[in-house]
Amino acid sequence: QPSFSDDFRELLDYADGLSRLEVWANGDTPEDAQRARSFGARGIGLCRTEHMFMQADRLPVMQEMVASVTKEERIEALSKLKVMQKEDFVGIFRAMEGLPVTVRLLDPPLHEFLPKVPEMRERLEALEAEGKGDGPEARKIRVLIQRAESLKEANPMLGFRGCRLGIIYPEIYEMQVEAIFEATVELMSQGVQVYPDIMMPLVGTKEEMRRLREMVDSKAKEFEARLGGEIPYMVGTMIEVPRAALVAGELAEDAEFFSFGTNDLTQTTFGYSRDDAEGKFLAEYVRIHVLPDNPFHVLDRSGVGRLMELAVREGRQTRPDIQIGICGEHGGNPKSIAFCHKLGLKYVSCSPFRVPVARLAAAHAALGLID
Ligand code: PEP
Ligand code: MG
């Protein structure tokens, strides 16, 4: 629980009354969700599900899935992951009862889940030296090495990740959607109010959006039949590659919400690596006025902000009531929050610890105190 004084709490509530923007939080665990709620977040704007697979007890099962040769093997590993993933969602939905939770389906390149190849080779050599080169562990390591090499890409951030995984291996996203709906149905049957919003990463074409939406809708039908009632879910997409902003009007045919992933959108618009966001070169560019601000911190109309304006306009043309927010790091930056206010977004979503500052910034923006 944050130890805010009563005065500060009162100030934040007063600020909320002035704001047009809501402040939501990014969080991947029930603890994050509880913290977000205690800081005053009005929803979870980004639950990155990949973090759930990185935990020590899940990684071996994830590796089993990535190393699978047949679809049957993959499905068996996925069914184990589903049980774990469902428990995560139950915890998060419970912590956020009555508020929306935006769950993003798996995003990172699959090879990130595999051990590093040199480490695996070292282990293999050790096994061979012990005369266990034909044993089950050595066999498994060989499959993992081969899979890691086949998944290796020169630039994995631009490669086989995001919804591309869900299109090529539908069973991965189906598992996640089932885990979301299983958790939802379980809680709704107990009278808990759950609002799951399912978000697709890295979408850039209408066809990607359409296929994924159809998959979610068909799963929803199955679970609604099981529940004997409607599940108040939405399906939407991140806008995080320039093409998504350009074809936002088409994406809105199948997306009930957009969330700007400005980390990737900045990387792909400027061609700067997001890993260099805090590096020397951008700071120097700002110092010598080649750039007005670090584009990974501040949105403006000359760059990523222009694409956002376009996406908002086109999206609303197709679907006037489309819900639009932002979940990239900019969502916690006061100047960028002012930009989002002017764009008329519904919410900014930031790290739980930034929520109080973002609530004040949203009020400042409404009062015209930040530009
Ligand atoms: C983004 O790209 O802005 C985003 C929120 O997604 P991630 O940081 O997980 O790529
Ligand atoms: Mg992203």
Image: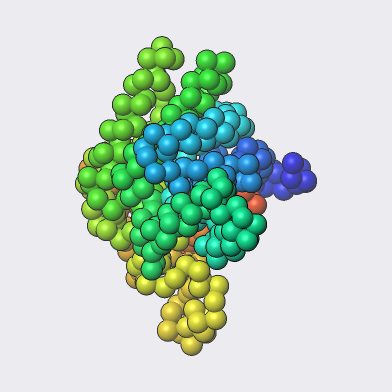
Here the colouring is rainbow
Q: Position of residue 201 (x, y in %)?
A: 39, 49
210 lies left or right of 113: left
Q: In the displayed structure, would residue 116 be above or below residue 13?
A: below
The answer, for residue 40, to whether it is visible in the render is no
Picture mark count: 0
Q: Position of residue 249 (x, y in %)?
A: 23, 48
Q: Position of residue 4 (x, y in %)?
A: 75, 46
Which quadrant would residue 71 be assigned to in this image?
A: top left
Q: In the displayed structure, would residue 76 be above or below residue 118?
A: above
Residue ranking furthest to the front? 131
* Quadrant showing the N terminus: top right
Q: Position of residue 224 (x, y in %)?
A: 39, 18
294 lies left or right of 7: left
* Residue at x 43% of width, y 29% of height: 178
* Residue at x 38% of width, y 68% of height: 154
Residue ranking furthest to the bottom? 288
Of residues 227 and 306, the one nearer the viewer is 227
The answer, for residue 61, to whether it is visible in the render is yes
358 lies left or right of 234: right
